[in-house]
Amino acid sequence: MIPISFLGSHILALVFPLALYSFLTSFVAEKKSDQGMLYSAGKATFFVFFLLTFAVLLLIGAFITNEFGLIYVAGYSSRSLPLFFKVTGLWAGLDGSILFWTWLVSLYSVIVWSTQKNRNPDWLPTLNGVMSFIILFFVSIMVFANNPFAPSLHTPPDGKGLNPLLQNIAMVFHPPSLYLGFTGFSVPFSFALAALRTRRLDSAWIDATRRWVIVAWFFLTLGLILGGAWAYVELGWGGFWAWDPVENAALMPWLLATAYLHSVIIQKKRGMLMTWNVTLICLTFLLTIFGTYLTRSGIVQSVHAFSEGNLGPFFLGFMQLIIVVSAYFIITRLNDLKSRNRLVSQFSKENAFILNNILFVFATFTVIWGTLFPTVSEWLTGHRTTVGIPFFNKIMAPIGLLLLALMGIGPMISWKKSSWINFKRNLLLPLVLGFFGCIAFWILGIRQWYALGSFALVLFVLTTVYLEFYRGIHALRLQNKTDAWTAFKQLFVTSNRRYGGYVVHLGVLLIFIGIAGCVFKQEVDFALKPGEVYNFAGHSFRYVEPLINEDEHRTSVAVRIEILKGEKILATLIPARNFYKQSEQPSTEASIYHTLLQDIYVIVGNMDTTTSRADLRVTFNPLISYVWVGGFVILLGVVLLLMPSQKGGLKSTSTLASILFMLFLWGYPLSPVYAQGMHVETGEDPFIFLDKDSPRYHQIKEISGKIICQCGGCVRMDLASCTCSFAKGEHNKIMSMLDQGMNEEGILDAFVKKYGMPVLTEPPNRGAFRLGAALPLVMLPIVFILGIILIAKKRRKQDEVLVSGESVPANYLKKFSQEVTKNHES
Ligand code: HEM
């Protein structure tokens, strides 16, 4: 029998020249206008897909049959690993994930070929050429650096097993969703280059690209939501977003793609921002590669990153190529990309979209800056620092609120120029409601600025969305003489883009509610013996019994806890602590009681085996369910956006099939099963002997919150959240330093001296660090004001051109009035 390593390696070696052939032949075929040659390139593309599919199946087969002769399989699987997780080994490590990634791009490339063959034959050579080149790049990584089929010198009797944190049902859905999103952006990028190359830059490429962007955006959004849900249930710190570099890597292209989804609306309706749109889509693709570079090059430190990555030079070279090629085409096509219209007024929908884009781009810049700051600071100062949650929250919170405000204003104001009447009709009621809502929330005791701002703005935007739906339904009822429900459904048939977009906005509002709820989070650590009860925040926690289990795979120590309100038992939870035998790694399974108003999140730490006394941490997470419900609503909105519609939607059956596939995928995030399996690195509560009301307790907790645990097992948690035994030792050190009369600054300095700058959750507020950390904060208002000034200047300049008689060319005007009329009709 042929060994798998031999077969797999040779398949990859064969894919390399085939992809190269497909890439080169596509361009030669275009140059020579040789249809036969182009079809030969297409055949190579299909053959590449066939071979890569075979390679993927081969690797999955190797996992299922415990083929530990492959280094990759031995590193991520073991005999006792459930079959379910063996299959996910394909994307559990660096080499396999690159193979999976390449396969996805090749899957997209055959779909592009099949769908564009007749629709856009003039774009086909560039589309196929660019997609083949992307495949070539990833295949070259496998052939020259990271072969997933590399054989080991000695076949071990068993593999190392899968990291316990990855042994969660989310492992099946989260990475593939993210990869589908990331790789999906290679398609609009190829379209953009094809449109630039052929100089066919009218709205055709926008139409073709929009659909692909929405599909990729859907998967990226799904990946982000699943990632958040996974972090929430898996990492045990009770939160869902830690601004980890790997999370940020997925957020960056998402932010730019969201900006693009809005700015293309201006191009479609007003023929403006053509250069900007094509640049945005190239940058979005660049960021997907940049994100891959971040996680696979070892440049950033993260729990999720593939630590063995040494692929930096590959990715840097590829990114440079993307920049040079995109810049070349954009610069040489600037004439074709000229705006065909002008801004008429500052108070217009165009302007709202432009400000929306400024905010999204600024948010992207902030995420890039915060993610790279540790590396940059190392270059500049020789010290690697850490940029943690507080840094990002400080900058992203105002950006989020500004976006929220614009989300209410943008849809309500008119194109070209909004009048006072338009303002009064559309915005007065939402503004008044938002204002009085703000006062009411204040009276109800909500004083935290972020939560107050979020709730008031959510009310404001919600009113605008309601008005939009109400007016739409009203108009259709009058027009078609139908009932409200039929009119409501018709809205999505006739204008699914618009109303699908509003459903997406509704989802965003719900997520904002969920995020604002985090401000009211409450947490307590305590220890109980069986039969004892602890009271906290109006609830009682009764320790019923310990549950100890052992199988060939793991040892599990769990406790049965009842949550009571008064005499009524609300829920029985079973948080557990597991020890995985193969990987010799501990993990803890938390248990959550979900309600729409709050989650009660319980984890267990150490248990004394003689007395069964267990350390417990309980977290109350108000409104957190809205994050998941909001995510679900966003995905629903995207499905509505893609629904076949009478005007402007997708019509092909293949799209319907992909919608069904999506429906299948997003049924998952809210399933109750998901809420149960949870792990966390944990140890006993170090604060247990301190009086929770004493100033010393709060002092230690506050300082601990500024220091990152160096145990190496947790996910860059701060010392206030990490419950491992190492953290306990560090708390004791802080306590004794305080006893010696040291202040907070002295203690933080002592930690920096011992562990270096990365030990701090935020860069210290002094010197070059202060400047670096404050840069995005200072730049936010500057960029915003500059944006407004630039818009005003551009408008004045255009006015001058018009006044001086150099009017817009007549053929442009004619073409454009036709296009606008067409858009109005659609
Ligand atoms: C996180 C924030 C946001 C997300 C995730 C989001 C998402 C979306 C999506 C996916 C669409 C559908 C696009 C399409 O059909 O191609 C849409 C439509 C729309 N968005 Fe947003 N959006 C956000 C913020 C904003 C903001 C700040 C504005 C303010 C200008 C805005 C204004 C609009 C408008 C007016 C539409 C409807 C366009 C139409 O009539 O076709 N959105 N949004």
Image (tube, rainbow, N blue to C red):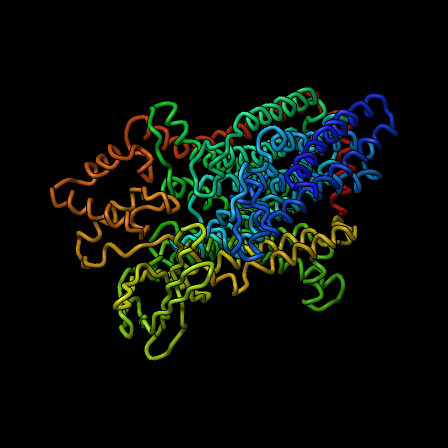
Say which of 76 and 117 sits in front. 76
Q: Name the one closer to the observer, 468 or 803.
A: 468
Is 669 on the left-hand or right-hand side of 702? right
- Asked if residue 172 is positioned above or below residue 106 in the image, the reply reads below
Residue 529 drawn above or below residue 443: below
Residue 516, how many percent across, how many down?
A: 41, 54
Left or right of 108 in this view: 504: left
- The image quadrant that residue 268 belongs to is top right
Residue 356 visible from this viewpoint: no
Which image quadrant: the N terminus? top right
Q: Is residue 466 visible?
A: yes
Q: Position of residue 481 (x, y in %)?
A: 75, 66
Q: Is residue 585 left or right of residue 185?
A: left
The answer to whether residue 400 is left or right of residue 619 is right
Residue lying at the far left of the rendered structure: 740
Q: Who's the residue at 42% across and 35% down the image?
A: 370
Residue at 83% x, 31% y is 40
Q: Is residue 435 above or below residue 34?
A: below
Residue at 50% x, 48% y: name it: 404
Residue 775 lies, in percent from the top left, at 39, 30
